[in-house]
Amino acid sequence: MGNRAEYLSNALQKLELFFGKSLKTSSIYQTKAWGQTNQADFLNLAAIYHTSISPPMVFKIIKDIETEIGRIKREHWHEREIDIDIIFYGNEIINNPDLHIPHANMHLRRFVLQPLDEICGDYIHPIFNNTVSQLLKECTDNLKVELWKKD
């Protein structure tokens, strides 16, 4: 919600302060809202960073960045200013109440897979043992994901 492109730009700038320049960043994609569908379209992108910071600390940093950008806590799947997720962290598998790596539902969401496929389609999911490209081909999510053209 709000100035979606500005929120994405701010997020990338703040992520760079902690993790350095992204190794790859996808195009920006526009998608109909997922979960609660009676809200504005979402903008999504994916970025790859190299870091030695532990996954729990990365999670804390990104939640702090969301707050700095202006994210306000709302009900689940409600529109929001920014949402930053960790999809993969190398080949690590983490399952605890606050953090799931790989992201638990990424394979079900075309808006996650499409930008990921652009920048790391050959990456193999450490649990499913399929590439991102294979997961995208098998994804049953029918929400349209298209390259974003500035409003």
Image (cartoon, helix red, strand yellow):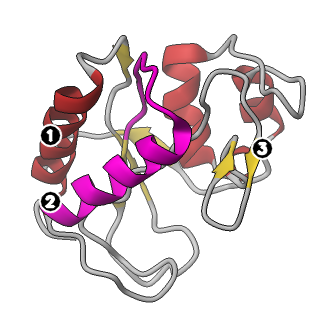
Residue, x 70% and y 40% (percent of image)?
102
**In the displayed structure, does residue 27 sit left or right of residue 127?**
left
SS under mark 3: loop
The residue type indicated by label 2 comes to Ile
Residue at the bottom extreme? 75
Q: Please say if 148 is above or below 142.
A: above
Q: Earlier in the sequence, mark 3 or mark 1?
A: 1
The residue type indicated by label 3 comes to Cys
Distance between mark 3 and mark 1 Cα atoms: 28 Å
Q: Quadrant of the N terminus?
A: bottom left
Label at residue 139: 3
Label at residue 9: 1
Give the class, few, some or many, for how many residues have Cα within 10 Å of label 3's Cα (few <14, many ≥20): some
The residue type indicated by label 1 comes to Ser
Circle 3 or circle 1, nearest the eye: 1
Residue beneath disc 2: 69
Asked whether the residues under the numbered discs 1 and 2 touch, taking CB atoms below 8 Å apart as contact, a structural biologist would say: no
Residue 35: percent from left, percent from top: 58, 75
